[in-house]
Image: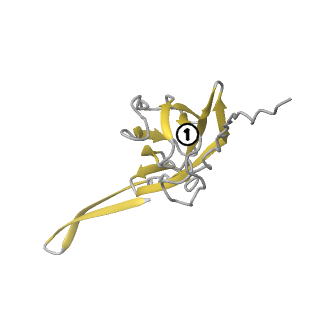
Amino acid sequence: GLYNRAELQSSGSMIAQDNDCMPTPKAPNITHSKVVVGTPAVVAGSPTQYDVRYRITVQNTGAGAGVYDLSDTFGFDPNVTIISVTPVTHGGTDALATTINSGFDGVADGVIVNTESIAAGGSETYEFVVRVNVPAGSSVANDACVPATSGNGLFNNARLRTWSGAVDADACTETPKVANISHEKSIATPVAL
């Protein structure tokens, strides 16, 4: 524990002493991971639009409770445009202790939660769906994911900040391929009968 002893001396002789002790505080160990859930799903009636679901999992494997901030930033293929972002939903074994940022959009506002507490052994999840548009006939140069690199595929970076500093976790899936169907019509040379 955290043992402490105090002594009072006068002219080299001890005249009083006292001690106290408290248990060593239990430290948290908060980590996170990020995944793309399933594959991008084409939006019915809009063949160039896709819904992409992301999940961030925060875990505390330490013996004590802790506090963290969580943010997320999109780094999509430059040909991709964002149509919408759903509100973030919370799950896991640990209850939400603060309020999820309703203004989260992954671009201008990347904050999901601030000063969220998590119990020892607790787990929390955050999910949201991004609807994107991939223009037909667009370049495929940045379709593939490149590890830890923004601007490729449907890259996404989640940042966890705790008392020990900030840590990033990435997730990415390849930019969906969109069909580019065209046709043409011509008149054949007439043949005399």
Residue positioned 66% across, 25% down in the render: 44
Q: Which residue is mark 1?
A: 135
Name, please, the residue furthest toward the left: 11
139 w.r.t. 147: above or below? above
Residue 191 is situated, as x and y percent measured from the top left of the image, at: 81, 33
The secondary structure type at the circle numbered 1 is loop
Name which quarter of the figure residue 52 lies in: top right
Crowd tier of the residue under label 1, counting other residues whose Cα lies within 10 Å: few below 14, some 14–19, many 20 or above: some
> x and y percent of residue 45 in the render?
64, 24
Front residue of 21/105: it is 105
Q: Residue at x 38, y 61 (%)?
A: 3
Q: Position of residue 90 (x, y in %)?
A: 54, 32
Side of 164 where 79 appears, left or right: right
Which residue in the rendered view is the most extreme toward the top? 45
Q: Quadrant of the N terminus?
A: bottom left
Look at 34% across and 61% down and name the residue there: 4
Q: Residue furthest right?
A: 193
Q: Amino acid at mark 1?
A: Pro
> Which of 69/97 is in front?
69
21 or 156, nearer to the observer: 156
Question: Tag count in the figure?
Answer: 1
Residue 24 seen from this side: no
Q: Position of residue 127 (x, y in %)?
A: 56, 36
Which is more toward the observer, 84 or 66? 84
State the residue at coordinates (55%, 55%): 142
Residue 72 visible in the shown view: yes
The answer to whether 180 appears left or right of 81 in the picture is: right
Q: Please identify the quadrant where the C terminus is shown.
A: top right
- The colouring scheme, among rainbow, by chain, secondary structure or one colour, is secondary structure
126 versus 44 height, above or below: below
